[in-house]
Image (cartoon, rainbow, N blue to C red):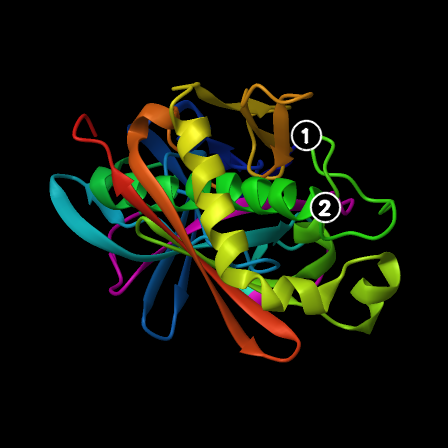
Amino acid sequence: MGFFVSEGERCMTYCATEVTFPQGITSLETQVMLLQTHQNGMDIVTYSTPFHPVSHIWPDHPADRGILIWQGSEYAVTDCVVGAIEQASGHLYVGNDIPVKREESGWLFVVVHRLGEVIAACQVGDKVQLQVDTQYQASLSRGHSAGHLAYLALNKVLALGYWRKDAERKDPQGYFDFNSYAQISSDVTPDCSTDVYRLGKTLRKRGLNSDDVLRDLSFIEQKTNEQLAQWLALASPIRLECTGSTLTDSRYWECDLHEANIARIPCGGTHCKGLTAFQSIQVTLKQVDEQHIEAVTCAQPSEFE
């Protein structure tokens, strides 16, 4: 898991960051594991964190906002990103500078809290308090969960009349997986998710009647929103199944929408606790050009949120 390295008379352990955001824990006390300055301030890695970092591989879900408290003073966390520590050298690589894939032997993946200033007296082993901006995190969680629900609804609507042959890929509920075939980008913002789909030659060969989709886009939008309303009425809980407690352990979004199978989607983001978080979810479908459509999913929070 980790190894020991002396720093003066100090002895410390490097290990993968334990993350608590899947359990809804938004504040905790932990210890500093590694410090590294950068051009505009300081990066701080702790043993555990409630912060969700933006992924350098698929940056669809923004980083959490919040503060780090050290010896009574508050410091804004200006960004939160994924890092990797090379065990042999103790060097921290951040974001796009990470040279390896996760699970690479000799490397540990961590959450990096980026500060816009250097805390000169802060040392490895010091206790710090980490506090997430809960309202901002909740808005991203709703946006991300709404995006999952929207693509499942869109898959179902398209499966009922817009495929001329059996597509090999199915979504978690057993419908042809238009989303995985066609999605080229996804962006989560507060109470919103924006997805762009490509209707290219490959998708046509797989069996999608793309011309019919473009022709019927308003109708498909209407049916997708009707399906979303039906699912929200179920008030089902949403849970995150975790295979472990560290950043790179797999996590799965799960919700019972009363289809053939429970919806189970691999996902590393944050999510709301259930469909009762939403007053409504509305999808707007727009043709961008002859080969692309855009789906903008907007969530209206429940008054109980």
Q: Is residue 208 left or right of residue 126?
A: right
Image coordinates for residue 128, horizontal then vertical, percent: 27, 37
Label 1 sits on a secondary structure element that is loop
Reading the image, the residue beneath label 1 is: 173
Quadrant of the snapshot with the C terminus: top left
What residue is drawn where x is 21% and y is 54%?
A: 76
Q: Which residues are magenta?
A: 96-122
Q: Is residue 285 left or right of residue 28?
A: right
Image coordinates for residue 117, horizontal then vertical, percent: 24, 64
Residue 97 visible in the displayed image: no
Image coordinates for residue 106, horizontal then vertical, percent: 74, 46
What residue is drawn where x is 40% and y is 34%?
A: 229
What residue is drawn where x is 62% and y is 59%?
A: 57
Mark 2: few/some/many CA within 10 Å (<14, 14-19, 20+): many
Numbered circle sitting on residue 237: none
Q: Amino acid at mark 1?
A: Gln
Q: Amino acid at mark 2?
A: Asp
Alpha carbon separation for disc pair 1 and 2: 9 Å
Q: Is residue 54 left or right of residue 248?
A: left
Residue 21: quadrant of the picture: top left
Reading the image, the residue beneath label 2 is: 177
Quadrant of the snapshot with the N terminus: top right
